[in-house]
Structure formats: structure tokens, C-alpha cells
Amino acid sequence: MNRCLLLLLIAFVFIGSPVFAQGESPDEILDILADRPGSFSLVVYSLDDPGSGIYHRANVMRPLATTVKVLVLTEYARRVASGALDPDEIVPLDSVEAYYFSGTDRGAHDEAVTALRSAGRLENNRLTVSEIADAMIRYNDNAAADYLMVRFGRAAMDALPEVVGLRYTTAPVPISGIYLNWDLPFRLGDDVANSYTQEEDRAWYIAKRLRSGEDFSNEMQTWMEGMNTRMSYGELSAAALAFPAGSARAYASLMASAFQGELISDRVSEIMADVLDYEMDDPGIRFLFNRILATKSGSLAGVLTDTYVADGKPAFEGGPDAPPAVLALFMESLDEELFEQMLGSEALTIFELRLLTDPEYRETVRDRLAD
């Protein structure tokens, strides 16, 4: 969460009337959603009173974008908790960057690498498995997610929804393989790749090839660099439907379970919460929240997904402490203008945080969406 947004949040709490980018306000975000009830799912509830929450199209499966990384993190936590994976194991950076394609992650991988170097890490271009997991969540690093997925293997990824007990959700798939599938379905010059009829099969095959050869990775980088110029927004938006899908209810439950110590085991939940709760490292965030502000978001053309768990200090209008709450807002089928307007919108973030920390505002939103 950037410093400008933090200042806006503080202004909203203590003044009540911040200046929003492009004239937007949280109520205008609500107007946008209410005008498009079929294009989004919203789940938000207090952890101590789920029955009084909002469950708008809660079980509709929508493209997850990179919010699917929460599920990948679950497998990481499972393995660390069981002793099957050493979080301090050293990994060459090249092993992660085999899956990296510049221009596809809004600078996330470069930001993660820069942060590690600034912290005195990455000695001899090596990092730990725990730093890879952290980069996947904190910086939204796609290459880090793909390294973990390929290392864990397809069988483990395919089994995850059942292992965790999630309905209305599909298994994670390597992101590099999905991206290359969008523009490269039958151009690999490889009879094995061309023999796959399912996109998931081809995506896994491509990702494994990326791991195995630098020449192939370089060739794919060349293809990827031109993807954005070859594909229109409409084509990219349609292709986003190939991403793993899930429901807002399922991912809200996943986040809530991690922070209630109920996800598989206390230790798994603890590891999950520790990685997801990175926002609390910021003193300003700790000023606004008691114990938790954990979040994972994702975006693709036409798709925006946000998940939160929060434990807020006094509500926005100066009431008592807001009880811990969880939120999942999944949007799809956004036209290009609206997508760009909503992407990174400060008003959208404040709308979500107000829903999390102000039960009265939650009632207002519920009533509006019921119209």
C-alpha cells in the first residue's frame, strides 16, 4: 500500500472527506457495481458473525488472475509445516527467472529483486525459498509463483482445492504457461506440445520446458515481448478466462481460515498469515489497524480480484473497534475504460476498507445491492 494511499486513509478516518483521484469516491464505486450486478461477486463479513455479511453472487466462479497465488501459498505452508520443505533452502535466482517475462507483471519481479538487494540479500544471486514465497505475495511476482508450482508439481496443485476443502474453485496453473498459450498455442514447433488439446496440459508442459532450457526461455521471451502489440484488449480480456477460476466465498473462506488458525493446522495457518500480513510492517498501517491488514489482489484485462482480512481500529466515523472481517471482491467483463479507471483506484481501496471496518456502511451497501 503506497504512502499516498495511506495518507488518504488517515484523512478518511479522521477528517471524513479526502480528495479522491479523478473525482471518485467510495459511493461512486458502489454506483458502478450496482449498475453491473452480474459482473461481480462480493463477500464481506465479520469473522465473529458471518451470518450478517454480504454474499452477492458468492458462489459464481470468476477468473482469479493472480489471486490464485493464495492457494499456491497454502501448499508452501503445508510443506514447510510438515518438514517436507526447508524455507531456508538456497535457490539460484536463475531458477526463478526461467519463468520471468518482462512486461507481463507490471514490474513486480524487478521490484522484488530490487527490494531484496536493498535489504542486503541475493548474495551471489541466490535467495531462500521463503523469500520466493514472500516475493510471490508481497510483490505479486509471477515468476516466483511459477517456480513454486513447478517445483511442487501438477499432481499437488490439482489436489489442492480438495485438500483445503474449497468448492467452486479450480487448481493453480503456471502463469508463464497460461500467458504463452494465449499467443502461442501451436507455434512451439513441438509435436508433444501440439498434441495437447487442453489448455492446462499445454500450460504445464510449457512451464516445465521453461525450467529445463535457457534457449527455450529466450525464444519464448522474444514471443512474449510482442504479445501486447499483437493482441487487442478484447482478445486479452477473452484470453483471461483461461486463468484458474474461483468464487468469492471460497477465497474469503480461505483467507479467514488462515487467520483463525483453522486452515489445515495451527502451524499451516500461522505460516500463511505471516506471509499475507506484510502490510502490518508499515508503521502507518499499524496506526490504523490493530492486528491484521492482509491482502492479495490480481488483475488481467477485464478482471480485478481483491481479498482482505482486516482488524480495524475505531470505525471511520469514530465508533468502537471494528471486529476482524474478511472481504473478497471479484470483478470481470470490465470494458477497457472502466478497467483502467478501477485498476489502482484509491477510491476502490477505500470502499473495500470501509466495508471491512464499518459495519453500518456494510448495511448501506447490502441494501443498495439488494435493490
Image: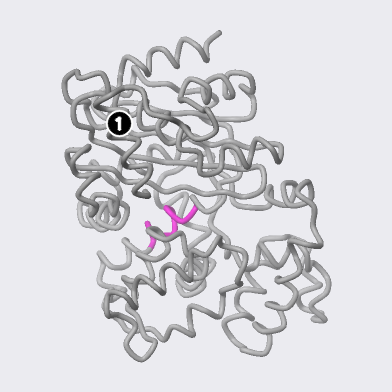
149 to 282, vertically: above or below: below
105 to 323, vertically: above or below: below
The residue carrying pointer 1 sits among few (fewer than 14), some (14 to 19) or many (20 or more) residues within 10 Å by Cα, namely some
Q: Position of residue 250 (x, y in %)?
A: 45, 38
Q: Which residues are magenta?
A: 68-75
Q: Position of residue 287 (x, y in %)?
A: 18, 40
Q: Residue at x 34, y 17 (%)?
A: 52
Here the colouring is one colour
Q: Position of residue 128 (x, y in %)?
A: 32, 78
Q: Is residue 151 left or right of residue 129?
A: right
Q: Quadrant of residue 324?
A: top left
Considering depth in this image, is 228 or 92 the residue closer to the camera? 228
200 to 21, vertically: above or below: below
Quadrant of the image containing the C terminus: top right
Q: Residue at x 37, y 40 (%)?
A: 308
Q: How many marks?
A: 1
Main secondary structure type of the part rendered in magenta = helix
Q: Position of residue 248 (x, y in %)?
A: 49, 35
Residue matched to label 1 = 11
Q: Is residue 69 rendered magenta in the image?
A: yes
Considering depth in this image, is 141 or 185 the residue closer to the camera? 141
Q: Residue at x 27, y 27 (%)?
A: 13
Considering depth in this image, is 73 or 279 the residue closer to the camera? 279
